[in-house]
Amino acid sequence: MKTGGQLVVEALAANGVKRISCVPGESYLAVLDALYDADIEVVVCRQEGGAAMMADAWGRLTGEPGICMVTRGPGATNASAGLHVARQDSVPMILFIGQVQREAREREAFQEIEYRRAFTEVAKWVGEIDDPARIPEFVTRAFAVATSGRPGPVVLTLPEDMLTQSTEAPAARAYQPVESHPGPSQIAKLAELLSTAKRPIAILGGTRWSAESVAGFQSFAERWQLPVGCSFRRQMLFDHLHPNYAGDVGIGINPSLAGEIREADLVLLVGGRFSEMPSSGYTLIDVPYPRQTLVHVHPDPGELGRVYRPDLAIAASPRDFVAALSSLTPSAEPHWSARTGEMHAAYLKWSTPPEKGPGDVQMGPIVNWLEANTGPETIFTNGAGNYATWLHRFHRFRRYGTQAAPASGSMGYGLPAAVAAKHLHPDREVVCFAGDGCFLMHGQEFATAVRYELPIIVLVVNNGIYGTIRMHQEREYPGRVSATDLTNPDFAALARAYGGHGETVARTEEFADAFLRARESGKPAIIEIKLDPEAITPTRTLSEIRNG
C-alpha cells in the first residue's frame, strides 16, 4: 500500500526524471514528502511562471519533458505563462497542479479552478486523477502525450485527498517514445523535386531535433549545396559559419533572404510550423496555396496542410527524416552552388554589427567582444524585446543545444531559462540577455540562481523603457508617449543584495573588464548595460522612427 504522493514520485522516477522545478503549496504536501526520500532534485523557485519556464527550458534543451509542480488557483494561473510558451514553441513539459479535495469540487472551494476549462487552449491534454491506483497510468500517458507528434505541455491535477489516500497500484513503467518515419516513396519524390529545382532553400525549425540529426542535415546540405535558413529562435539548428547557412528566418529578416524565399521554386520546411513570426506575417509563403513547390516535414500529421497546402507532406520527426536522407545523393553537381555561396556572404554581411550608435554605450562592439570571448558551447538565453536583436541577428550560433529563447515572444523567459540551463550543464557558460522590462518579469529567480550557486551571467540592457512597445508607439502615434516609461532599480546593487555579483557598464570600454570580473567571481552575476533609449534598433534611432 502506497499513498498517491508516493505513487506520483515513483512514476516520475520510472520515467527518468532527475529534477523538477516547483513553488511549494499545501495542496500537494504528500508529493513533497515523498520527494524527500527520492533521488530527484527539487529546485525551489520564487514564482510559478518562472518555475514553469524553467521546465520549458529543460524540455527545450533535452527533448525530455520538463517537470513543474505548483499549487492550485493562483499558483496554477501564474504557471500558465510557461504553459503558453511550451505550447506555442512545441516543447515537452508536464505541469502537476495540487487540486482541492474531491468532495469539495464544483463548490468554488478555496482556490478552486476547473482546469480542463481553464487550460485546454494552452495544453495538449488536461487530466485529473481521481483514483490513486491510476496514477502510474496517467503519468505514463502524460509523458507519451507531451513527447509525441508535435510536442507540448500536459497538465495533471492532483486532488489533495487523493494524494494522501493509500492504495495498491502496479509499478510504473517508462513511456515509450513514438517516432514517425518517412516512406521510401516520399524520399524518392523529394530527390526528384530537388533534382529539377533551380532555386531551392531549406528552412529548419521546431523541436525533436538532436545533435546527431543537426549534423546529419548539415551533411545532406553539403552534398546538395543547399542553402539553409533557421526559423525564428531556432538558430542553433545549423552552424552559422557553415558555407551553406543563409540566415535566420524571423523578425527583422535580412531583406535579401526574404527575397530569396519568395523567389524560390522549392522550399523544404523541416520540423517547424512556419507560423506568423518566421513567415513575416504569412508573407514569405502564400496561405493556403504557396507559389513555391512546398515540401513540409513535421512529426504531427495534423500540422501538415493546416495552414499551407504542401506539394509533398511528410509526417516524420526531424531525427527520422534526417536519417532517411543519409543515402540521398545528387546525380550531378547542383547548379545552384554559386547562389548558396552568395546567400552565405549576404548573411555574414547582415550579421556584422554596427560600430556606432547613439549614447556612450555601443552594443555592436559589445557583441563583437562576446563573439571573440565566449566559446561555441556557451548557452545563450533571452526573453523578448528589441534588445534581443543584438543576440539573434549578430551572434553566430555554432552548436546544437546552445539557445533557449521563446518563439512565443514571452517576456521574462531568459532568466529562468538560464537557471535551468546552468543546472543542466554546470560545466558550460550560460549568458542571459534581458531588457530592463523583461528582466523584472521574473527577476526574482536570480535568488534561485544564488541559492543553488549557479554562476550565470545576466546582461540587463537597460534603456528605461518598454523598448519594443515604444518603437511601435512612436511609429503609430509619434510624440504621444503613453505607458512605456520605466523606473528601474540599480541592477548591480540588486545582484549584490541577492548575494550575487553586480557590475554597471556606462561606457562601451567598461564592458570587457566587467564581464571578466563577473566570470571570475564564480557567482551569479548581473551586468547592467546603460543603453541610450535612442538606440532602439541596431540601424535606426527612436527619433528616426518618430519622424518617419
Image: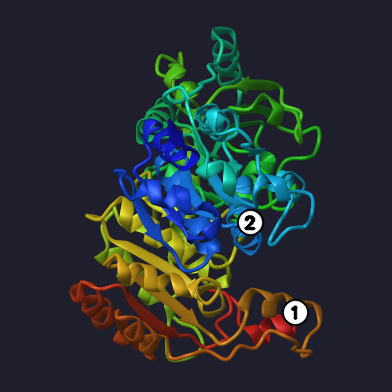
Q: Nearer the viewer, mark 1 or mark 2?
A: 2
Q: Residues within 10 Å of mark 1 (few under 14, many from 20)?
A: some
Identify the residue at image location x=61%, y=78%: 467
**Whether residue 6 is situated above or below residue 71 in the rendered picture:** above
SS for dot 2: helix
**Whether residue 331 is situated above or below residue 150 in the rendered picture:** above
Residue bearing the label numbered 1: 473
- In the rendering, which numbered label is found on residue 316? none
Q: How is the image coloured?
A: rainbow
The C terminus - image quarter: bottom right
- Can residue 19 be seen in the rendering of this structure? yes
**Whether residue 531 is situated above or below residue 368 in the rendered picture:** below
Identify the amino acid type marked 1: Gln
Identify the amino acid type marked 2: Ser
Q: Residues within 10 Å of mark 2 (few under 14, many from 20)?
A: many
Q: Position of residue 274 (x, y in %)?
A: 65, 42
Q: Position of residue 283 (x, y in %)?
A: 75, 48
User: In the image shown, does 467 or 424 lie closer to the viewer?
Assistant: 424
User: In the image shown, does 235 or 161 lie closer to the viewer?
Assistant: 161
SS for dot 1: helix
Cα separation, mark 1 vs mark 2, equals 28 Å
- Quarter of the rendering containing residue 476: bottom right
The N terminus - image quarter: top left
Residue bearing the label numbered 2: 80
Pointer 1 or 2: first along the chain: 2
Identify the residue at image location x=77%, y=47%: 117
Identify the residue at image location x=30%, y=46%: 37
Tell me whether the residue at label 1 lies in contact with that at label 2, contact meaning CB atoms closer than 8 angstroms.
no
- Can residue 394 be seen in the rendering of this structure? no
Q: Position of residue 84 (x, y in %)?
A: 64, 52
Q: Position of residue 46 (x, y in %)?
A: 47, 69
**Whether residue 515 is situated above or below residue 281 in the rendered picture:** below
